[in-house]
Amino acid sequence: MEFEYTKREWSRGIVYVPTLPILLNGFPVGHALVDTGADATLLPMELQELLAVELDTRNAIPFTSAGGDEFKAIPTTKPIEYTIEQSGFRPKTWKGIAFFAEGQPAILLGQYQCLEKLSITFDAPNKKIRLA
């Protein structure tokens, strides 16, 4: 599978970032940022009801953002199902624990039980991401 990077505008112009179109528990949630520096997958709290998942509030853990701010994230009680689909290919599906955080603006795919399950190649000059 091969996907184009997503074009984004920011204060310094345009940047292209590696994202993947993803379904969570069968629901298409759009493009998620592939964040190889993230320890775990972080989801906006607003998705919790939509995905119909229970959260393990007793086991919330602290995370530190790239900007150095600390925040708490709450894990799911059971693994969620991740799916990446592309026409002409078999879907890639796996399960893993995800974490929800208040104020999380984007879906970040992190290492724990997510990116560690995939073989990913980044082709930044051509703005493409490939899954084997």
Image: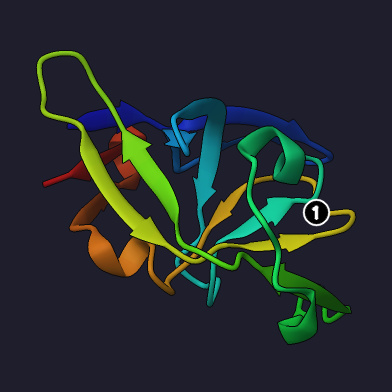
User: Mark 1 — residue?
Assistant: 104
Q: Nearer the viewer, residue 50 or 126?
A: 50
Q: Residues within 10 Å of mark 1 (few under 14, many from 20)?
A: some
Q: Quarter of the image holding residue 5?
A: top left
Residue 86 image offset from top left, x and y in percent: 24, 21
The single residue placed furthest to the top in the displayed view is 87
Q: Is residue 125 above or below residue 122?
A: above
Residue 48 image offset from top left, x and y in percent: 72, 46
Which residue shows up at 20% across the image and 31% down it? 91
Q: Is residue 18 above or below residue 67?
A: above
Is 15 positioned to the left or the right of 12 in the image?
A: left
Q: Amino acid at mark 1?
A: Gln
The answer, for residue 13, to whether it is visible in the render is yes
Q: Secondary structure at mark 1?
A: loop
Q: Nearer the viewer, residue 19 or 123?
A: 19
Which residue shows up at 76% across the image and 72% down it? 73
Is 92 positioned to the left or the right of 88 in the image?
A: right
Is 114 positioned to the left or the right of 92 in the image?
A: right
Residue 93 image offset from top left, x and y in percent: 26, 44
Q: Nearer the viewer, residue 120 or 46?
A: 46
Which residue shows up at 38% across the image and 62% down it? 114
Is 27 positioned to the left or the right of 48 in the image?
A: left
Which residue shows up at 79% across the image and 74% down it? 57
Q: Which of the colour schemes (rainbow, by chain, secondary structure, one colour) is used?
A: rainbow
Residue 75 image offset from top left, x and y in percent: 64, 70
